[in-house]
Structures are given as structure tokens and as C-alpha cells.
Image (cartoon, grey):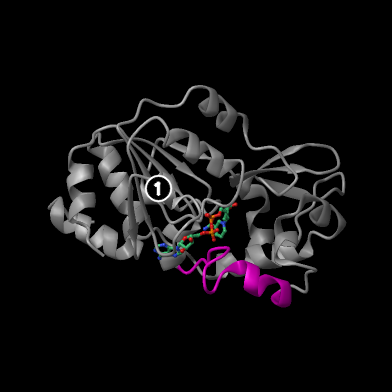
Amino acid sequence: MDLNRATEIIKNSDRITVFTGAGISTASGIPDFRGENGLYRTVQKTYNLPSGETLFDIDYFDWDPRPFYRFTGDMYGLDPQPTRCHRLLARWEEEGRINLVITQNIDGLHQKGGTKHLLECHGTYDRGHCRACGCEYGLDEYEATMIRGEVPHCSCGGVIKPDVVFFGENLPDEFYRLWENPPESDLILILGTSLNVHPASDLALKLINRAPSLIVNRDATDFDRFIDTVIHGELEEFARTMEESFRFTL
Ligand code: CNA
């Protein structure tokens, strides 16, 4: 993978808006959706689901929340840590090169890696709400149950669901506010996403119409032809090369 061009583009940018997907976290052990060992191929069998999609389907969750929580418990068991690429983005933000990171991920690794200006398009595990009475819960109130892979319940008896966005639910208001008022960017940097989950990916496609764009992703995406610079490769290698080119240690 020839990263000289990417280095040059990034060195000449100081208002970079970044759009990330599951590929930025695979090096931490969390599988992506559609990649070679992606969740779509594995969860159906592991959690006895009708299809991969049902893991994050709101109607299925309301019918049976146990597979989602068994999956969540298993992910906790991996004890995922921010990757070199998460830390790279935090470093560039600290230097004033990045104005915003938009992520489709729900793993919390951008915050853990130090990113401050973050939009989580698909919500967060940090808060939850009861599906029956709507009561809000902080993560500390239901995390221990999730770690055990069990279903947390509200005092009313309803099931608590973290505020992660399932298929069939709306994205957070901040997503639509950003849609209406996109940031001023001199580069849209897309990392580790197939750009296949809508409407989140529509935001990336909207942004690339307004500024130069660069994608680094292992596999080709259906939208590569609309992106100015396309690099197919591993994000850990990208981050290692950037670390050398920018002369810092992550
Ligand atoms: P996706 O459709 O699975 O695409 C991931 C892309 O990343 C693929 O095109 C891969 O080629 C690429 N990729 C995987 N590993 C690497 C790597 N090491 N280096 C470079 N490229 C890599 O996932 P998207 O993010 O596009 O889809 C959005 C979904 C995935 C959102 O709804 C997320 O909530 C959901 N998701 C999130 C996580 C997470 O939070 N870590 C994990 C799995 C799925």
C-alpha cells in the first residue's frame, strides 16, 4: 500500500473530518460486520438467531433480548482496547488537525483512545432506557449484568436497552443536526467502513461532495469511485506509517 500520497494530503490538511466504521476496531479483537470473519457470518449460529441482522433488530430485541446480551457479554470478555489508529486520531485532534470524528461504532474505543470531538451515529452503551416505562439508567447501573451476558431489568420489571441504535430505530438528534450543518472541512478521511449501513453512510457521501476525500479500507467499497484517493490496506499499517511520517510515538 503506497501511503506517500496519503501522508502528503494529511500533512496539507488542518480541518479534517473523519468518518470511521468497524474496521478501525478489528485490531482490538472486535469483529466487523461484513469482513472475512464478520459478525454477519458468525452470530446467527453462535446465538441461534434467524439471521445476522436480528442481533441488532429492535423488534427481535423486544421479543427476546437474550442473544443481544449474550453477545455483549462476549464482547466485554475480549476486553478491547483502543488501536494504534484510534490513538492516531486522538493525537491529530490534539494537534488541531482534526475537527470532528464521526463514528458508526458502538464500542467506545474512540473516547477511550482520547478523541474529544465525537459524533456516535449509532448511539452508545453509556446510557440505557427501560423499554417498558422509559426510565433512564447510567451504564454503572446495568454494566455488571451485561458483563455477565445477562439481561438487565428496570425496577418496573421492563428490559433495559442501551442507547445503541438498532435497525428500526432513529439515529440520535445530533446526527440530523450535523446533517443540516456539516462542519467546514478541508479533508474527509474515511477509515474502516464498507459504507453500506444507511443513513449513517449517507452522511459520509454528503460530506465528500463538499471537500476532498481519502479512504483507507481493507476491501473495496461500492462508493470508491466517488472518493478522490482510495487506498486498500490495513489500518494498523496506515497508523504505523503515519506515526513515522509525523514523527511521534503513539
Ligand atoms: P462493515 O460493513 O463490517 O465494514 C467494515 C469494513 O472495514 C470492511 O469493508 C473491511 O474491509 C474493513 N476492515 C476491517 N478490518 C480492517 C482493518 N484492520 N484495516 C482496514 N480495513 C478493515 O462495518 P461498517 O462499520 O461499515 O458498518 C457499520 C455498522 C457496523 C454500524 O452499524 C456499527 O454499529 C456496526 N459495528 C460496529 C462495531 C464496533 O462498534 N466495533 C463492530 C461491528 C459492527
194 displayed left or right of 218 = right
Which of 128 and 199 lies nearest the eye of the viewer? 199
Q: What count of labels does the image hold?
A: 1
User: Residue at the location (41% across, 37% down)?
Assistant: 208
Q: Is residue 176 above or below residue 36?
A: above
Extreme bottom residue here?
A: 45
Is 201 within the magenta? no
Q: Is residue 208 among what the camera can see?
A: yes
Residue 97 image position (x, y, % from top left): 25, 36
Helix, strand or loop status at disc 1 = strand
User: Residue at the location (22% across, 61% down)?
Assistant: 2
Residue 147 image position (x, y, % from top left): 63, 63
User: Residue at the location (41% across, 67% down)?
Assistant: 27
The quadrant the N terminus occupies is bottom left
Q: Which residue is mark 1?
A: 190
User: Residue at the location (39% across, 38% down)?
Assistant: 116
Residue 7 image position (x, y, % from top left): 19, 50
The quadrant the C terminus occupies is bottom left
Q: Is residue 121 among what the camera can see?
A: no
Which stretch did the figure color magenta?
29-46
Q: Give residue 145's quadrant in the image.
A: bottom right
Q: Give residue 220's quadrant in the image.
A: bottom left
- Callout 1 crowding tier (Cα within 10 Å): few <14, some 14–19, many ≥20: many
22 displayed left or right of 164 = left
Q: Is residue 33 above or below residue 59?
A: below
141 displayed left or right of 67 = left
Q: Which amino acid type is marked by label 1?
A: Ile
Residue 206 image position (x, y, % from top left): 49, 34
Is 45 within the magenta? yes
Which of 26 and 238 lies nearest the eye of the viewer? 238
